Amino acid sequence: MRSGNPALKESTFLDLGSGSVVARGDGAMTLNGTVNKTGILLLLTVLTAAFSWSQAIGADGQPAANVGLYVWGGAIGGFVVALVTIFKKEWAPVTAPLYALVEGLFLGAISAMFNNVYDGIVMQAVLLTFGTLFALLFAYRSGLIRATENFKLGVVAATGGIMLVYLASMAMRLFGYNMPYIHDSGLIGIGFSLFVVVVAALNLVLDFDFIESGVEQGAPKHMEWYGAFGLLVTLVWLYLEFLRLLAKLQSRD
């Protein structure tokens, strides 16, 4: 099994700690349980996102002075909690909700900043994200899209390439340089964002397949939280990429 999502790597359901056994019955991971946990994580994310949104824009309609606290605090905090969750899967019932709460602070603040420049862009990005989620879920469940080995290898390779480009871009910015074209609103920049959106969306298919495999293998109950966490990671990435793409398109008007 492969997934482009670092939270759902090949060994996730195999490396469950020394002495662990395959769970069955009430102690096993279920699809309905994972869906319910995903819903809880999404609700927690929305709650803190709504709070940081309300704090991010001042009475004059401009970004508040403390907006950076929510953006960077949420981003760094979410990254740290995500790493803890990945390396301590059995802690997922606690760390996954904590990740959702912290990541919501980041998403609310960054969304408010985008919406302040491009009015209505956030609702468009939200609708596109969940529309993509349900469309791909339907395609996966109906068999229209199958997570074959070649499909998985292609998505994982593309995801890795994108991550390398983003890391190189961040490194260049530390030295005062910007990677040309891909962050611009020109045809190359828009094309790059479209490509990233497609790859992020296809990672949802791998996540569906990975969660289904965990259910079939009788993974322990706490893996429901871990599977929901992994799916949320992909949804956050997809939403942010939709925001970037829509911002590039609207900046051309």
Image: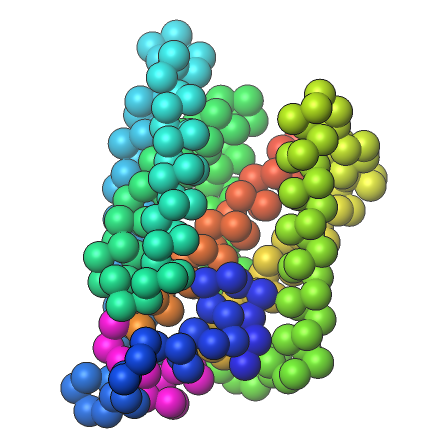
State the residue lying farthest toward the top.
60
The residue lying toward the viewer, choosing from 251 and 6, is 6
State the residue lying farthest toward the front.
18
Quarter assignment of residue 136 = bottom right
State the residue lying farthest toward the left.
26
The residue lying toward the viewer, choosing from 97 and 49, is 97
Quadrant showing the C terminus? top right
Give how far across and how far down residue 174 sits, in percent.
Answer: 65, 26
Task: Tell me: 231 left or right of 152.
Answer: left
Residue pictured at 47% horizontal, 76% vertical: 11
Give how far across and how far down residue 55 sits, in percent.
Answer: 31, 22
Quarter assignment of residue 4 = bottom right
- Vertical arrangement, residue 190 with respect to residue 136, above or below: above
The residue lying toward the viewer, choosing from 30 and 11, is 11
Task: Tell me: 221 left or right of 123.
Answer: left
Asked if residue 221 is among those painted magenta in the image, a careful observer would answer yes
- Vertical arrangement, residue 25 with respect to residue 87, above or below: below
Residue pictured at 78% horizontal, 47% vertical: 191
Quadrant showing the N terminus? bottom right
- Vertical arrangement, residue 233 with respect to residue 152, above or below: above
Give how far across and how far down residue 70 sits, in percent.
Answer: 36, 28
Task: Tell me: 57 left or right of 148.
Answer: left
Q: The magenta stretch spans which residues?
A: 212-222
Asked if residue 15 is among those painted magenta in the image, a careful observer would answer no
Residue pictured at 82% horizontal, 39% vertical: 187
Residue pictured at 34% horizontal, 10% vertical: 59
The residue lying toward the viewer, choosing from 61 and 13, is 13
Residue 208 seen anywhere in this rendered image of the structure: no
Task: Tell me: 194 left or right of 134.
Answer: right
Give how far across and how far down residue 40 sits, in percent.
Answer: 25, 58
